[in-house]
Image: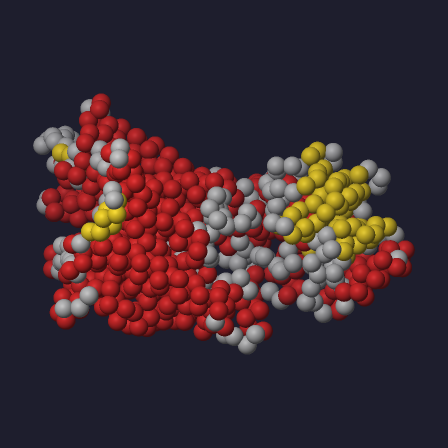
Amino acid sequence: MSEVLLRAQGVGKRFGGFVALQDVDIELRAGERLGLIGPNGSGKSTFVNCISGDFAQHDGTVTLDGHALAGLKPHRRARLGLARTFQLPQPFASLSVLENVRVPLLFSGDAARATQRGMECLEQVEMAAKAAMLPRELTQVEQRRLELARALALNPRVLIADEAMAGLSNSEVDQIIELLLRLNAAGTAVIMIEHIMRAVTAFAERLVVFVAGRKIADGEPRAVLGMQEVEDAYLGRQ
Amino acid sequence: MDPQLSLLLNGIVSGLLLGGLYAAAAAGLAIAFGMLDIVNIAHPALMVAGAFLVVVIGTTLGLDPLLVSLLIAPLFYLVGVGIYTFYHHFFERRGEEALQGLAFFFGVMFIVEVGLVMAFGPEQRFLDPDYAFITWRLGEIDLPLRMLVPAVLAMAVVGLLILWLRRSFTGLAIAAVAQDAEALRLMAVDPVKIKRLAFGISVALAAMAGGALVVVQPVEPSSGQIFIGRVFAICIMGGMASLPGMVTAALLFGVVENVTATFYGPSWSPAVAFGWLLLVLAFRPQGLFGKAA
Amino acid sequence: MSATTIPVTAETAGPRNLAFWGGAIGIGVALVVILRLIGNDYGYFAGYFVLQYVVLASAWNILGGYAGYVNFGAAGFMAAGAYTAVALRKATGLDLIPGIVAAAFVSGLLGLGTGYLTLRLRGVFFSIATLCLAVVLQTLIVNWDYVGGSRGAYIVNPLEIPPFASWGEYMFIVMLVLAILTVGIARAVEHSRIGRGLQAIRDNERAAEAVGVPTLRLKLIATTLCGALMGVAGAPLPYYSGYLNPDAAFSLSYAVNAIAMPLIGGAGTWAGPVIGAVLLGTLQQAATVTISSALNLWIVGWMLVIFVALAPRGIMGWFRKRR
């Protein structure tokens, strides 16, 4: 539990003259549960896109297991075990639920056993019964589960759950938290980006706070939430 | 003056005038493609349809082509409104604009072009106003009115358009529609209505460009084809949603193409258009004047 | 590749492949026998006409149907193939079959280059580039005296070509083989992980990349394959008509049919372009006898617009149960 798996050093991103993210250092240990919070526009999504490779160019460095990720496209990073979900579920609309999960397996896993592994991933998120359905026939929470199953198919070492619970009911939020806890228990480190404070406090063992593109706090959740700067940032904005 | 230098100067000046025609042809597309995100590849075909209508009406009534093109602009506005209504209903609303929507505009382009062949035959048509045969001379530089008048008209129309887009509420809404449809909804502006209006204007501009085309050169049903590469290259080079950028790109494009034609022969000018487009796409997709992403 | 097909067919892939190839060869042999019994060169002419569209439409479908990227330059790629065959014949004396191979190579390279320059951006830029490609290639060909420029080039064909009954039959059989191969390739792509990856790209390119699909590489494979097969469709053209000029090679009807046929038949399935090509090709072949070719094309344009609006899944969509 002690080795650093994912390390971001001095990560920053500018759009024209606008600084979206500046000089962020974050270390994630293997199997860790990290919560990342901050007001809208504080740079959380920008950070995710720098890590995932969606932004080809940014300041600073990102390493996974000691290997620099610079210049690697998103699909290469995904195959190295860096999986993400999207704020809005982005299923492959014309493919069945099982086929959605088989796509990552065909390209990164054991292609010959893709069907079997795909079903296993669906079982992990309790979606095996819906394998033959089309994404548009699923409910909100089921689409979220599919999104997670598709990320699981990459056999990830790091899972970035980008607002995986937005728009869900209370009981559905609990279901997803439970699911993420189970994945984490199986060894996947998780970065949870979330506005639902209840979910973050229930899940994270460490909390990072972004405000205006900078990291202003990093530590044990209770301590971080008690900090004056964090309170100011949230109250000041709202 | 050195004859080579004089040739070059004339090449540049007539290139600028040619650029005026290109600006006219690309103005409507800058709205449809640049601002509304509607890839109307039928735009040059609609321009040629406008040109044919101008020739027919102008010849029958003995009117000036540019005047006729302004008269038929409202009709083309309605055609544009009709096309957009259809496009929105069947493609944009369903989120199928990528494949089916592109195929739709391709079909429209095709129907217009083949329709013109059936109605008028493949031959060239022309309608020369009297001033088309006058050339002003400024020292060594020739200013043929055949090129100058359409270019001036095009600049005037584009200038008015820029003013309108910047000053009027509707204009601002059009400029905003591609960027933030949700914000428009909050402002109680229906984005669909705005897009319909803007697309109508874009097709009306095609009619105006058709009139300019008639003054400059004889037209045939397939005239639109060689404009496709040019107008899209100009829109992209100009930074998509910027009319001043579009005009600058059009003038530059006209000069490069005309100077190439002067020194290497006119049959190579279409290759220049495509080469430019590819270079821009490969190295500066945000356009010559757009901001880096 | 067939080992990684859709799960339900994984165990049945072998027999299904056998059924496909058996059926295709069966239909091919039957066509040859029937045409020989009819014994009229017009039959071969009409058959060739339809089959070249089977190749062209299937080629378009690999990029357009599976990946959702629209190629407007079918006529350009096809003409590149046709003129490659002409140039090869003139330069080396090599005839039809080497010409087809060379055409696949040249047009495939053209597809790869266009894709490489534009596909890293929004897909519509690729479409616009292909739209201009035909115009510019035509300019180049018109200015290229070696292959005849605007006057065109003649190719003298032998009268007899044993064991075939006639030159027409030979050309028909060549195109038949090309069509069967093309449909077979398209079907193999559809059932392979390449096809699945292309479908994922069509549905959601960003998500595809995020789950490990090498999107740019797959798209480049598709543009190359699409270009190469379009070149293959064009390579026999000069041998078929004995004469090739820019107007014929860059004919508008190739550009519009390459898009209309897959979309009307049902894009994204290997059978869709075949249905579309047979249907529209036969209709156009029959109609040229009675109506002008312009009206003919005009009708195709209207059919394209009506189908994409009202039946976006094409004819194949009617047979699939709605879910």
Q: Nearer the viewer, residue C147 or A98?
A: C147
Residue, x 33% and y 67% (percent of image)?
Answer: B204
Residue located at (17% from left, 33% from top): C148
Q: Residue at x 34, y 32 (%)?
A: C105
The residue drawn where x is 64% and y is 41% is A77
Q: Is residue A220 visible?
A: yes
Q: Position of residue B156 (x, y in %)?
A: 35, 62
- Residue lying at the far top of the rendered structure: C92
Front one among C153 and C158: C153
**Could you say which quadrant of the image residue C239 lies in?**
top left
Above or below B90: residue A127: above
Residue C240 is at least partly visible in this image? no
Question: Which quadrant of the figure has residue B117?
Answer: bottom left
How many discs mark residues in the rendered view?
0
Rendered position, C130 above or below B211 = above
Percent of width and height locating residue C268: 41, 53
Residue B118, percent from left and from top = 16, 61
Observer-nearest of C50 and C295: C295
Q: What scheme was used to colour the molecule? A: secondary structure
- Residue C306 picture location, percent across and down: 32, 65
Question: Is residue A119 shown above or below C291?
Answer: above
